[in-house]
Image (cartoon, rainbow, N blue to C red):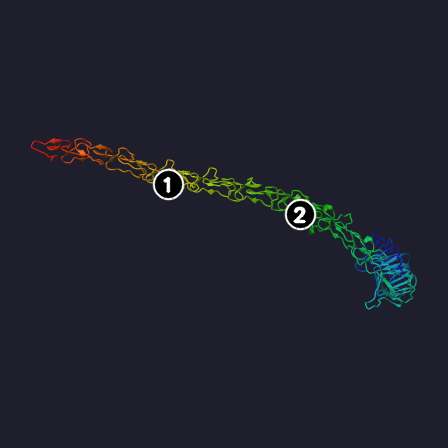
Amino acid sequence: MTPILLPTRLYPSSLLVSATVYNVATSSLKHPFVYSKDDGDLILASSGTLRDSAMVNYVMLFVTECVSIMCTSTSQACVLDGENNKKIMEVNYMSQCVATFTRLYFYRGDARDNNLGSKHGGALQIYDSEIIISDCKFAYNRADKGGAIYLTQGRLWLFGNNFYYTYSGTNTNSADTIGDDGYREGGTWIMSNQCPAGYQGPATQGHDIDITGSILGDSTAEGDYQYNWDCPSVCASGKYSTAGATDGCTSCAQGKYLTYATSSLNHDSEDDCISCTAGKYSASTVSAECIACQGGTYAESNAVSSSCFPCPVGKHIPDTPSYAYTMFHDSEADCISCTAGRYAPGSGMSACAECGAGRFSEFPENDSEGDCLLCAVGTSSSVAVRTSPCAGCSVGKFAPNQGKISCENCITGTKAVPAAGSATHCVSCPAGSYSGSVGSTSCAICDNGYYASDEGSTHCSMCPAGKSGDANLQGCTVCAAGTFSGAAAASCTACDGDGEFSVTSDAGSSYCSVAGAGKKPLSGRNGVENCAAGKFSEGGATTCVNCAAGKYSSAGSSYCTASNGYAQHLTGAASCNYCGLGKFADVSTNTCEECPASKYSTGGGSSCTNCESGKISASAAQSTCAFCDAGQVPNAGSTDCVTCTAGKMSNIGGE
C-alpha cells in the first residue's frame, strides 16, 4: 500500500494546559472527563470508564464540534462502555477540521436497538467528518452494519488499532448484515501504514480485519477482508517519534531523559525529552531517567548535563546518604572546602583525604598532601587530621627528623638536647659521666672511686683495689709505693702504721705489708731494709733499735748479743771490744778494766782471777801471778812478797 500523508493537525496544541473547565449539570461527560471550551477539545484526563448519557438516549457521545478525544493515562486505556445497549459515539458535520481519537477503548457499543436513529456503527458512526483513529481498541461492539465503525461520508484514517479477536481467532466485533469490524458506505477510508507520533516505525502488516467497502488505493470488492497496519510498540525509554516515522524512534539528546510509558502521548515529540534537573545528568541518548550526581560532582540548574562536573581540587561533596539529595549537587557552591587537617589532591573527590600521622594543616582548602606540613624536628604527632602544629617531644625524648609519628627515647649513655623538651637530638654523655636509663635528660657524674673512660657510658666502673679514681673520673690511678687502696677508693691511703710499707707494681697495692724481724720500712714506705749493724728489730717496727751498751748486732738482726770477755760501753755497737791479758769486761761500765794488783786475767773474761796461794800480782793488768822467791811469802793482799819472819822459811812459791 502506498504511504499516505497524515493531516498536519493530529492533536491540539494544549491538552491540559490553560484549559478552562466547563461543567454542565446535564452533561453525560462525567468524571474523569474534562471539557475545554477554548478550542473545542474534549480530553480524558485519567483512566476510567464513561457510561450512559442524558443528552441523547441512543448514543453516549454525540459530537458536532471539532474535538480530539484521547486518554492521557500512561498505564491503561480509557474505556468507553456502551454496556451492550447504546451506541458509543456519533460524529457529524466536522469536515472543516480533523478530529483525533487516541488510546480509547470502544467496548460493548450496540446500535441494534436504536429506535431513534441509525442502527449502524456500534462503536462509532461517522458522517461528513474527518477523523484520525490511532492506538484504539474495538471489542464486543454490535450493529446492523459496521459492527465497530460505520462511515457514510467524510474521511477516516486508521492505523495502529486493535480490532480484538479471541485467542481462537474469533472476531469479537459483529454486524448482523455486513462488516463485522467496519463498513464504508461512502467517503474515504484510509488504512495508513504510517505510525502515529510516539510509536516505533515502520508499521507492519497486521491481521486481516473485516472492513467492507472500497479502501483508498484498493478496489477490493465488498465483503473481503483487509489487513490493518500495526505499529510495533510505543517508543522505548529515552526515545520519541513524530507522526509518520518509518525509521524507528529518535533518541533524546544527552542531558535529557524520557521515562517509558505505555501511552504514545509521552513519546510523540522531542519536547517530551526532559532536561535533567540540577544535580542530575544523562550520559546516554536513551535515558529513561537522569542519574543523580555522585559524591564529588555537581550539575548546574541552567545546563543540559550529559555528565556531572567534578568539584575542583581542594573541595569535595560527600558520598553519604545525607548528601544523596540533588540539592547538594546542583551547583559548584555545593563543593565543600576540605577542612584543616584534610586535603583533596584531585578533582571530583567525594571525601577529603586525611593528613596522616606526622603531619598537620592549620588551614582549609588543601589540594595536595604537600599542604599537610611535616611535623618539625623535635615534635611528633601519632594521630591523623591534626589541625595545629605537632606537639613537642616530652622530656627525655627527641625527634631528629621532620614528620615523626612519635618521639624516640634517648638511649642509655645519652641525654636529650634541649633537656626541657622538644629535643631535636641526643648527645653522648661525656667521659666521667653516664646515663643508665632511656629517656635521660642529664648525665650523672661518676662517684669518687668510679670512672667512665669513654663517651656514651651507660654506667661507671669501679676502681679495683690498688687503684684510686682519678680527678676527672675517666680512669683509675695506680697507688704509689708506700700507699694502698681497697676497691672503689677515691684516693690511696699512706702506709703509716708500725712497720707498714708497700712496693710499686702495675696493679698497685691493695694492702700494706709489715716489716719482719731485723727489718724496717724504707723512709718512703716503699720497701724494707735490714736493720743496720748495732741495731735490731723484732718485727712490725718502723725503726730499728740500737743495741744497748754491752751488746752488739750485725745487720738485719732481730736482737743484740752480749759476750763474756767483751765490753762495749757504746750503744748501737756493731761489735764489742775484747778485754785482753790483764783486763776484764766490767758489766757495770761496759768497758775493759785492768785487773787490780793481786789479780790477773788471761783475757776474755768478765772478771779477774785472784792470784793462787803463794803468788802475787804486784801491779795491775797482770795476765799472770808470780811466785815469791824462796824465803818470801805473799803479803795479805797478794800484791807483794815479804820476807819470812824469823824462824820461818819458805821455798820458792812461798811454801
At mark 2, the secondary structure is strand
Q: Which residue is mark 1?
A: 513
Q: Look at the picture and state if 610 lies above or below 71.
A: above
Q: Quadrant of the N terminus?
A: bottom right
Q: Amino acid at mark 2?
A: Ala
Which numbered disc, 2 or 1, marks the residue closer to the eye? 1
User: In the image shown, does 33 or 564 lie closer to the viewer?
Assistant: 564
If you read the primary sequence from the N terminus, does the residue marked by circle 2 or circle 1 appear first? 2
Left-right relation of 397 to 507? right
Cα separation, mark 2 vs mark 1, equals 82 Å
Q: Position of residue 242 (x, y in %)?
A: 84, 55
Left-right relation of 506 to 139? left
The image quadrant of residue 628 is top left
Q: Quadrant of the C terminus?
A: top left
User: In the image shown, does 505 or 247 lie closer to the viewer?
Assistant: 505
Q: Amino acid at mark 1?
A: Ser
Q: Which residue is mark 2?
A: 353
Label 1: few (<14), some (14–19) or many (≥20) C-alpha neighbours in 10 Å: many
- Residue 353 visible (yes or no): yes
Q: Position of residue 55 (x, y in %)?
A: 87, 60
Label 2: few (<14), some (14–19) or many (≥20) C-alpha neighbours in 10 Å: many
